[in-house]
Amino acid sequence: MTSPTSPPERTDAPAPAAPGAGTGVVPLVDLHGRSAWSILPPLILGFFMIMVDTTIVNIAVPTLQTELDASLVAVGWVNSAYLLSYAVLLLLAGRLGDRYGPKPVFVVGLLVFTLASAWCGLSGSIGMLVAARVVQGVGAALMTPQTMAMITRVFPPRQRGAAMGLWGATAGVATIAGPLLGGVFVESWGWEWIFFVNVPVGVVALWLALTRLPRLATHKRAFDVLGVVLSVVGLFAVVFGLQEGGTYHWGTIVGPVTVWGVIGLGLLVLVGFVLWQRRLGDAALLPLRLFRSRNFSLANVAGMSVSFAMIGIFFPLTIYLQSILGLSPLHAALVNLPGSLVSGIVAPLAGRLSDRVPPKWVVATGFGVLAVAIGWLAAVVGPGASVVTIVVPMTLFGVGTGCVFSPLANLATSGLDQRTAGAGAGAFNTTRQVGGVIGSAAIVATLTARLAVTLPAAAQDAAASLPEQLRAQFVDGFARAGGSLQGGRDGFQVPAGVPDDVARQLSDAATTALHQGFATAVGQTLALTAAVLVLGFVSSVVMSSRRADH
């Protein structure tokens, strides 16, 4: 659609410099005298809502349990359902943008997302809320690849990094804005407003999208129906298995169906998908020639690494801040605020810098900073740590994410042509989401495994201060916890008839053991995240420095 006052748009025609345009960026398509920057507001608003809704629900979990009379597992699906439908459909959504054009697919996705947000807020049961979140994830998947594809196709290569910088800054700010906004809305107006807030924002974004986004050339080909089925089934099985494996203790789901069986089936289906895509060539849902580009392939590996790190640091840190340091959910979210703001400032600067120097060096620097930040954080987490000692490395973490996110997206898309920009953006975002899912599963499993070791060890140390006849029972209580923080808290019960002073001594020892054991496990778990960042660093260093200007 076009603005009522604008002439019909041409597709992918070179744009002459508009009179009086000054030094504005000259777009690759005809925007009728407008700067390429005019397309960013609707894209950024849509992407901001998508990223906010990946984290905003976490803060409302206890409220949803109470007000919707739901179990913790059921409430967990409010977030899982959104992330699952979002990740599984990204690849398909990217190709839809190539076939029908980024603008109409983005507008449909934005409309679906906005209406689903209203449905979420109006839900009266946990089942209805989960269903609405599935639809919301569909809208998010339709939008995300189009934001990258539109920037890639409208901005000239030499200015694309700056535009991607603003796109990356949006992700950094939105990720932390979710818990903060969630805390404000839940405490002030009710949980419904964590979803209702999307409605006015979505309406504004829709108006801007309809009036400012250009129609770009489409590439009509026979649609790869079998590829769609194989990709959706394979990705669903793998993502579901990794995302929900912990819920089923990595064992039986129902009857003969196991978590690892589902993951294995998904991997087999994805192998079939790749073989089918190889047979179809450029007509495929995911043209494999995209991966002939060294930078595109390595950017996907690096994208998985940084998503793994972001999940890997926030999950154990959030529990640590609330369970060990005793911060409220809102105060725990505020600890991450400086890093988020710094990321939002650094990302546009890093994007502009990647227009002037080989982007791979900006990305490699970012990965190095991330590794230092996580190493620093691992060294300072402890039962008696002050909030300031956590805020400083988290701020450095924000610098690293700001350096990585937008230049990496630029690297992933800079070599794509107009026929495959959507497919490439879909593939990059899919691997990024899958990296986050893998990170979530790996970090939970690692943290649980380390707790099974560190809690009994900490209990052994704390037992030295107790009367000798109580030490064995005290340590056994923590051993029975089996890697559970809550289990450790409940695993030792003060024996009946114990004098008050001894009971207080036992309680203090239990608290000391819990805090020390968990802090130690968090530090050790962060080492896994640092190792994955090394993979991202190596991937960025071996990228080509040659700029793919087209």
Image (cartoon, rainbow, N blue to C red):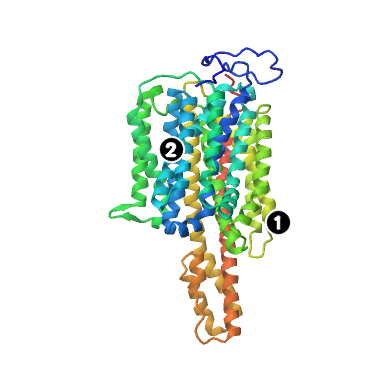
Query: In the rendered view, does 271 fall on the left or right side of 350?
Result: left
Q: Is residue 104 positioned above or below 269 on the image?
A: above
Query: Residue 513: percent from the left, percent from the top?
Result: 57, 70
Q: Secondary structure at mark 2?
A: helix
Q: Is residue 295 positioned above or below 326 on the image?
A: above
Query: Residue 325: percent from the left, percent from the top?
Result: 63, 63
Q: Mark 1 is on which residue type?
A: Val
Q: Residue under circle 2?
A: 138
Query: Residue 180: percent from the left, percent from the top?
Result: 60, 50
Q: For residue 119, say whether it is visible.
A: yes
Q: Is residue 476 positioned above or below 270 on the image?
A: below
Q: What crowding class fits label 2: few (fewer than 14 Cα within 10 Å), some (14-19), or many (20 or more)?
A: many
Closer to viewer: mark 2 or mark 1: 2
Q: Mark 2 is on which residue type?
A: Val
Q: For residue 543, say whether it is visible.
A: no
Quadrant position of residue 457: bottom right
